[in-house]
Image: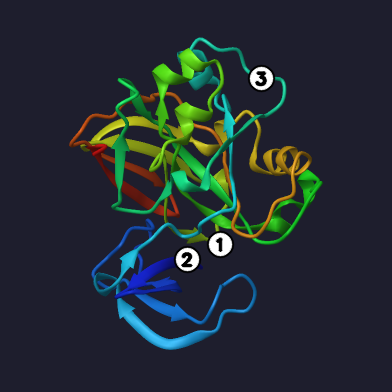
Amino acid sequence: MRICRVAVDEEVSYGVVEGVGADGEITDETVIALLVGHPVGDLVPDGRVLPLADVRLLAPVIPSKVLAVGRNYAAHAQELGNDLPAEPMIFLKPSTSVIGPRESIMLPWQSESVEHEAELAVVIKRLCRDVPAHSADDVIWGYTCANDVTARDLQRRDGQWTRAKGFDTFCPIGPWIETDFRPADAAIRCTVNGDVRQQADLTQMVFDVPALVEAVSAVMTLVPGDVILTGTPAGVGPLREGDTVTVAIDGIGSLTNRVVERG
């Protein structure tokens, strides 16, 4: 099932996405069955079924926090000249960095080297702490696409990653939450202006999703809607004003954003 969050005129609602292609991509038949309230738990339709063209897709959740994991693909660690960590390298991105599909990534004046990082995102469905890896599925609501946008020059200069990863618009997620998804069966890709920059099987993660849920929840309590970014494969590269960047994951769909200079 695909759960989305949409704007209908001035109203924000959750909905179930129907009529999507087998590859997870939008078709002319795609519609949104709107729901009453928040969809964690029982789904209650409100009776409206709208064409996707009549709504605006938003970020599927606004998390209390975004937990991200560095150097979780060996080839990416190598391309940046870093060693693989012995345990998951966890950092935070603020909720204010989150944007949805078709929203613009804004290039800040403080950086001259902003890069894309295509990632699988895990969305948490219930309050939890100290979750063992074998119970991770019990607390996962579903999965979506994400782009851990990074000011690479600031990351190197600062020696820690808060500023480089935390600018407004630096965490696009979407287009929806896929609740029936298995990372072992999928690949991830990133294109910029149609050119492939990143491509990898999700099985290439150093620490898999259950291990990441265990590691993160051992540090802090997770609440419904929190997002865990699972790391990026090799091929990260620059984003320039006017670029269109797309993160696509087999079985989920694709997340596309334009790049603009911050006004």
Query: To which quarter of the image does residue 263 belong?
Result: top left
Q: Earlier in the sequence, mark 3 or mark 1?
A: 3
Mark 3 falls on what kind of element?
loop
> Decide: marks 2, 1 in contact (CB < 8 A)?
yes
Percent coordinates x, y for residue 70 in the rendering: 57, 27
State the residue position of label 3. Answer: 85
Amino acid type, mark 1: Thr
Q: In this view, does 258 lie above or below 78?
A: below
Mark 2 falls on what kind of element?
strand
Amino acid type, mark 2: Arg
- 160 on left or right of 196: right
Query: Foreground: 4 or 253?
Result: 4
State the residue position of label 2. Answer: 2
Query: Foreground: 98 or 188?
Result: 98
Percent coordinates x, y for residue 229 in the rendering: 55, 41
Query: To which quarter of the image does residue 84 belong?
Result: top right
Amino acid type, mark 3: Pro
